[in-house]
Image: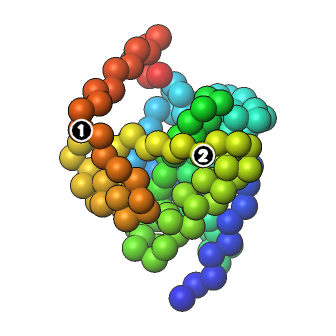
Amino acid sequence: MTCVRLRDLRLEDYERVLELWEEAGLPFRPLGRDAKEKVAREIERDSAVFVVAEAEGKLVGVVFGTHDGRKGWINRLAVAPAFQRGGVAAMLVTEVEGRLGDMGIDVFGALVEGENTRSMLFFEGLGYFSHDEVRYFHKTKSVDS
């Protein structure tokens, strides 16, 4: 198996992250919340932990972890198709949980789209529980957000 190394996301990784999200089939908003300027601001915050996985000098996984002071959130998790089912996603999530845990966060959540059963099974395998009685509501300033 190829050696995978985790490290902090750097802004110069941004274009590769977009490519990775596309390869992995993850919807993203490069004109809105996933815009380079917004990612740059989040990298600087003490409420964000953005981690990438590298193998053979290439970026093969990414996860954005954030917290609101009470709960940690696993966001934008993606792994290159050639590295899926090899433990990279679990490494990324475990790393974010650990770093957020060091900040005093001990409750974690992840939002998964209803038809994404692979991701649901993945998070269940990591000990996450589904709460079907909870409805998610959101509001955005624009369609790109």
Task: Indicate which label's residue lies in the foreground, 2 or 1.
Answer: 2
* Residue at the image position 27 percent from the left and 50 percent from the top: 116
Q: Position of residue 117 (x, y in %)?
A: 24, 55
Q: Position of residue 37 (x, y in %)?
A: 68, 29
Residue 77, visible in the rendered structure: yes
Q: Residue 44, located in which quarter of the rendered image?
A: top right
Position of residue 97 relative to residue 108, above or below, is below
Residue holding disc 2: 106
Q: Mark 1 = which residue?
A: 132
Vertical relation: 19 (above or below) 33: below
Seen from the viewer's position, the closer of residues 58 and 145 is 145
In the rendering, which numbered label is found on residue 14?
none
Left or right relative to 84: residue 98: right
The disc, 2 or 1, on the residue closer to the chain's N-terminal end is 2
Q: Residue furthest bottom?
A: 1
Q: Judge from the rendering whether residue 1 lies leftward or rightward of residue 119; answer left or right.
A: right
Q: Can you say whether 72 is above or below 58 in the image? A: above
Amino acid type indicated by mark 2: Asp
Residue at the image position 44 percent from the left and 44 percent from the top:
110
Q: Nearer the viewer, residue 66 or 100?
A: 100
Farthest-out residue, top:
141
**What residue is drawn where x is 73% and y is 38%?**
43
Q: Is residue 59 visible?
A: no
Label 1 crowd (10 A; few <14 / some 14-19 / many >=20): few
Q: Is residue 24 left or right of residue 97?
A: left
> What distance separates the C-alpha of mark 2 from that of mark 1?
21 Å
Rendered position, 138 above or below 128 = above
Labelled pair 2, 1 in contact (Cβ < 8 Å): no
User: Could you tell me the amino acid type at mark 1?
Assistant: Asp
Q: Position of residue 75 (x, y in %)?
A: 50, 43
